[in-house]
Amino acid sequence: MLKMTDHTIGIDISKARLDVFDSKRQEVRSFNNTEAGFRELSKWLVSYPPTRVIYEPTGPYHRNFEEHFCGKWPLVKVNPLQARRFSQACGTRAKTDALDARGLARMGGALELEPDVPVSKTTRVLKDLQLARTALVKDRTRLRNRSHIQSNKVLQRQTKARLDLVEKQIDQLDAEISKLIETDKTTARRRDILRSIPGLGPVASAAILTFLPEIGTLDRRQVGSLAGVVPHTRQSGQWKGKAFISGGRKPLRDALYMPALVAMRFNPDLKKKYQTLRDAGKPAKVAIVAIMRKLIETANALVKENRFWVEKGA
């Protein structure tokens, strides 16, 4: 008889298959990575609802699984590198799909990982649009750089035509992103709050809402860590290395860089903070990262309090 204890499921997702390890039954099963396979998996687990379902992102292969079970199961998406290191720390050197599923379940249970906040369909669509926009912006930069060195008339005309098309497509995506945000009252309200902060324009605000859907529910340390702008200390014994930033959500960190440059010039509060750091001898890069962190912390606090930005002392 199965005991009513913590029930963790580990799932290794590949293109064609889901390898599933059930910690309660100590059993491994395989299902097709299709809608029919998802239904079979649901039937297999219906008698024993899981406490958490652990899986790794696998490019496009986990997308359908995630969308199908989001909001239905307590999903936990973990970093593949951390999962692999956990398995190695447990003494597992071999690597198969079944062992990976078992390792994921073991990791989830040992660390008592909390389920992720379910992501709405609107957020998923926004992410797709934002990623497409990022790719187009890179294309635009590449085409602009190429146009400066081309002397052949035909190549110049072709590059200009492609550049005009990319510009048009970026405008279309911006319009679609704005339209999608307007359809959700909560998201639209958050967008307006973010836009009230000097330095955050429509593009940056949309990016923050897309890559940080948890905004307004986090504390200062959490929001800074997710943005990857919290310095990590390095020291051992008497040796002390320089602190550095790493990890977090790179698209979110990238989205904060240009707004920070604008804010340190036109946001009175952040302009003063930047100048104070520079006067204290901090390098420009360190001061800019501090502004990025302050910017996202301010945005998170305002959304949490559901109020617009006002200048200090105003």
Image (cartoon, helix red, strand yellow):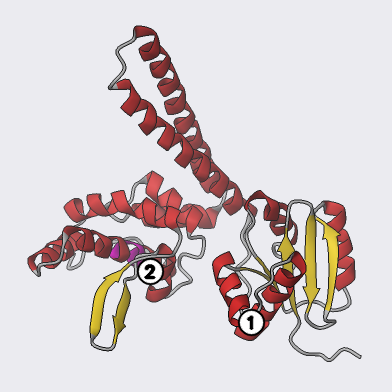
Q: From where the camera sits, is residue 38 visible?
A: no
Q: Quadrant of the N terminus?
A: bottom right
Query: Which residue, given by chain and number where applicable, does mark 1 sit on?
Result: 91
Q: Give residue 257's position: percent from left, percent from top.
A: 31, 52
Residue 9 as seen in the image, left or right of residue 274: right
Q: Amino acid at mark 1?
A: Gly
* Residue, far front: 93
Image: magenta residue range: 294-298
Position of 264 with respect to 37 (left or right) is: left
- The dot on residue 224 is 2
Q: Hey, what amino acid is under mark 2?
A: Gly
**Image position of 198 with respect to 161: above or below:** below
Label 2 with label 1: CB-CB less than 8 Å:
no
Q: How many marks?
A: 2
Determine whether, in the image, residue 106 is placed left or right of residue 158: right
Q: How busy is the neighbourhood of tag 1: few (under 14 within 10 Å), some, or many (20 plus)?
A: few
Mark 2 or 1, closer to the camera: 1
Taking the spot 64% from the left edge, 85% from the top edge, the residue there is 110
SS under mark 1? loop
- Nearer the observer, 138 or 213: 138
Query: Is the C terminus in the top left, top right, bottom left or bottom right quadrant?
Result: bottom left
Residue 220 x, y percent position in the rendering: 37, 74
Tell me the quarter of the picture where residue 44 sits: bottom right
Seen at 40% across and 18% down, the residue is: 159
Q: CA distance from mark 2 to mark 1?
A: 33 Å
Prevailing secondary structure class for the magenta stretch in the rendered image: helix
Which circle marks residue 37 in the picture? none
Which residue extends farthest left?
A: 279
